[in-house]
Image: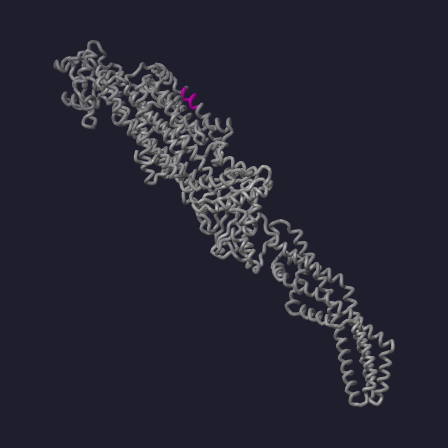
Amino acid sequence: MTLPSLHSQAAKGQQSPLPDTAPSIAVNRQLGRTFHEIEGGSLLFVVLTDDHGLSPSDENVYRRLIDNLRHDTQDRILVQDFLSTPALRKVFESKDNKAWNLPINLPGDGPSAATQEAYRRVAEIVKTSVTGTSLTASLTGPVATIADFQRLGAEDSRVIEIGTVISVLAILFVVYRNFVTMLIPIATIGVSVLFAQGTLSALAELGLALNMQVIGFISAVMIGAGTDYAVFLISRYHDCLRQGLDSDQAVKRAMLSIGKVIFASAATVAVTFLAMVFTRLKVFSAVGPATAVSIAVSLLAAVTLLPAILVLTGRRGWINPRRELTTRFWRRSGSMIARRPARFLIGSLAALLALAGTAGLAHLSFDDVRFLPREVGSVAGYEQINRHFPMNAMTPAVLLVQSPRDMRTPAALADLEAMANRISELPDVAMVRGLTRPFGEPVEQMTASFQTGEVGGKLNQVSAAISDRTGDLDTLAGSSRQMAGELARIRERVMDAMSGADKLLTALEELQGVLTASPTSQQLAGAAQILGRMSALSGNLSATVSGARQIAGWAGPIVAALSSSPVCSADSACIRSRDELASLVAAENDGTLGSIAALAASFREIQDPATVTLTTNKLAQQLSQAINFLKTAGGLRSRMAQMTQGASALADGGAAVADGVQQLVERTKQLGTGLSDASTFLLDIKHDAHRRSMTGFYIPAQFMDTDEYRRGTKFFLSDDGHSARYFVQSALNPFTAQAMDQIGKIIDAAKFTQPNTELVDASIAMTGITAGLKDTHDYYRSDMEFIFIATVIIVFLILAALLRALVAPLYLIVSVLISYLSALGLSVIAFQLLLGQDLHWSLPGLSFVCLVAVGADYNMLLISRIREESEHGVRAGVIRTVGATGGVITSAGMIFAASMFSLVTASITTMVQAGFTIGIGILLDTFLVRTATVPALVALIGRASWWPLGAEFRYLRHVGRLMAPNPQGRFSRMVPTYFRGRFRSANLPATAASITSRAKREKPGESIPHRGMPERHLGIHALPLFGCGDKSPLLLHRSKSASTRAGAARHLCAPRGDTLQHALPLFDLGNASMAATVDRAARDAH
């Protein structure tokens, strides 16, 4: 009473169903540490919906909700919203614009008390934030599902206990038809349940795992098993009372005969469940020890409290037996089975095997949500997610890649993209999101095909510009040549003008005339026109050279990639384009393009043609003035020398310009042709390489230093660059076996891309809901193998120890296995075929342990009684046993089945399926296996069932052969006799007549008057009256000494010696001594 209630302990001690060493759990913890998130957190989804479409006012509510959650400092929660990360809006907003999803990561495991308390506070914040708005909030996810399971489990446990008590009371009243007798098992069970709950609460303080489902389950098991033990003991107590024993002796005799069966039965159930502590799934490891402790408490109550209550009430006559109503029916059934065992065996096995065959159609589901009522909040939330978002959009599997190398390099990122691309091409993989593909598709700007296309486009633009300016280039070349000729002619005329100083004035006058004449003016005007064209061409030439230099900068990586590509080396067009790009890169590297750029700059410095004309006019004026100035020869010669030098330089420069322009035009035309070919090839790559496997991936190293890159990689890449995660969205239902198998295929596909890459020594693992279910499925299979082997071995060993035989335990084990499969087959028919529900994955394991253990209970009661009753033949023992135990086994089975059927009233379908399967299995075991199959088997196999027999039964079989009369009616003389634990030979009279005559010659105190009663059965019929009916007379006949035989009888049968004397008068043997009666019984057995 001082300990906390079991429900509070269960709520406080809730744990994750998977062990901490499970791969998915370990990866989840590693993710929390690597990305600075809540380590080992539990996921909660808040689904906000507006059927009329999301509006700005709804977004204000969303913003207010985020603020309220972040201001809640009581819990360390992680909110993933699209306000702080706008890029996530596309993920968290439905395409129909009617729903938002808000993932929240809560600290700790979902079933823990702290996490559930945090969940309740978040639920209250959400409710307060959306109340009175157009938004509807639904909370779902693993945390919400666990909360609903806990709440419904607590509610169901009370209903189950009340329903079980009512059904058990009703059956007990029908069986005993006595109010006091009916209340005794209930009182015993009530005390044991309270004591068991206190014990479990104390053990929970020491670390025993409990949950709400375990409480409801152990309550039903305790009530069923405890009632069975009470029924076994009370029924044997009533049998003893009917045999004439007083109440105290009846309790004692009942405990001696049925106590070992109850103990063996409880040990079978308790040890079998206790073995489940070695399983790895906590659904088994939690229910196993708790049930074992409960059964141990039930056993303790059955062998201590219940006998005490029977003694107290029996002395007052409150629990006297009523008239048996079913004994004749069961005895008649036993007789029919004993007469035709093969027919009953074949018929019962045919029915059982037909039902067992349907067990192979069982389809197990790992979707716990499907086993909750549809009106539960978490189920409604999942329905909202499925209605507005793609399947698994909110619950993707997470692929974690951890490498000892820094993955923040172009090569490593390209290898990561190759891995993601490989996974995305698997069947039923809807999307892969990660660093290289944030929204499920590779970023187009980071694909090599896109980058190649961009280069090709720029090349195409330059090539087109060159093609468009081909005429201008030809004009440029012609004008430059014409300008060179004109300048040369000017130089010649200037030289002619300097023929002599004495003719200088005349020359000047002639020069003035020449300059003013139209031919020279036309020539200079032509030169001015050429210079104008050169100045205009400088702009186009500068643009062309600038584009070519930009292309050369982009073309470097492409030339390197094409040079290492065997595909390009086999393509002549690719080779030509690669060579043209290489020449362009070389022109940039050796300074050719720089020289052309300098020439274009010099062209820009050429004066305007109008300036040339103006200069010419000014020259004519200056020449007129020079005539006046040339008074002295020195001035004339100086100026003429300067003019000659300038004219020569101008003519030489014009010739050089003409040659350079001609070369530039030719190189530009060639460049245009090469750029056109390269552009065509690169654009073909962009347009034709549309598949993901052909696009390639490349991130320039300089781009990785930008802030934009760092912001985009924060969510997918760890700070140290050694861990990356990808989110894999499947097109399959995450709770199906196909989705679990897909986890292994994804990991295999990722590892397939590792060799010869930067990820060759990286570790790859997955977590998420489906990965956790896969771990659950793997652990379940190994746990089921362990449970099956351990249960069979434990039950077999206990049966063998109880029966001291090996054959009977073997076919009894087979019978309970067939009974279990039949019950599972009936569940398949009821739930899968009729109701359309899959079976919960934990059902086969729990029902197997219960049905095999409970079936062993009834086996022990039945087979031990058959062995006791088989002294005069196995088939006779079958008849007596079925008649005596048929009603007991039926009552016990109905009570246990009723307690398990009370689970059908639960709200959780898992409990409903468990209750139905175990209940229907117990009924099959009660009304078919124990009443037809097993008795028929025992009748057919006979005494071989007890092989290898104990010493007593070997001796009796040997005695039976020796004492068979020969044709002359005589018996063997040499008969083994039991003495001091060994057998020895004893000389007995040779005929029945001599036995009688010897009895008459005994002393008066030892004589045995037979009075017409069959001599051979006189002693055997007398022994059961004083409690030696189950003891062999040969064990009592230990010595020739009468006192020794009497002592053995007193020690083995009844502690009080007068019991025998009070029983003998019933056979008119009142003057027979105990020693003589025992001696006579031993001789009768011979």
Above or below residue 566? Residue 184 is above
Measuring from the top left, give residue 91's x and y in whole percent. Answer: 56, 45
Instruction: Give the residue furthest to the top.
Output: 1012
Residue 1029 is covered by the magenta coloring: no
Measuring from the top left, give residue 256's x and y in whole percent. Answer: 25, 24
Choose top left, top right, bottom left or bottom right for residue 629: bottom right
What are the residue bounds of the magenta stretch?
A: 344-349
Measuring from the top left, give residue 508's x and y in whole percent. Answer: 84, 84
802 and 909: which one is in front? Answer: 909
Left or right for 476, reference 1018 = right
Left or right for 371, reference 483 = left
- Say whether residue 486 is visible: yes
Colour scheme used in the picture? one colour
**Position of the C terminus by quadrant:** top left
Left or right for 309, reference 208 = left
Residue 345 is covered by the magenta coloring: yes
Residue at coordinates 70% horizontally, 56% vertically from top-left?
Answer: 680
Instruction: Give the residue furthest to the front.
Output: 132
Above or below residue 233? Residue 750 is below
Above or below residue 1008? Residue 676 is below
60 and 816: which one is in front? Answer: 60
Measuring from the top left, give residue 505's x and y in whole percent. Answer: 84, 87
Residue at coordinates 50% horizontally, 57% vertically from top-left?
Answer: 406
**Position of the N terminus by quadrant:** top left
- Say whether residue 1024 is visible: no
937 and 130: which one is in front? Answer: 130
Choose top left, top right, bottom left or bottom right for residue 343: top left
Number of numbered callouts drawn: 0
1048 and 486: which one is in front? Answer: 486
Please, what is the dominant secondary structure of the magenta stretch? helix
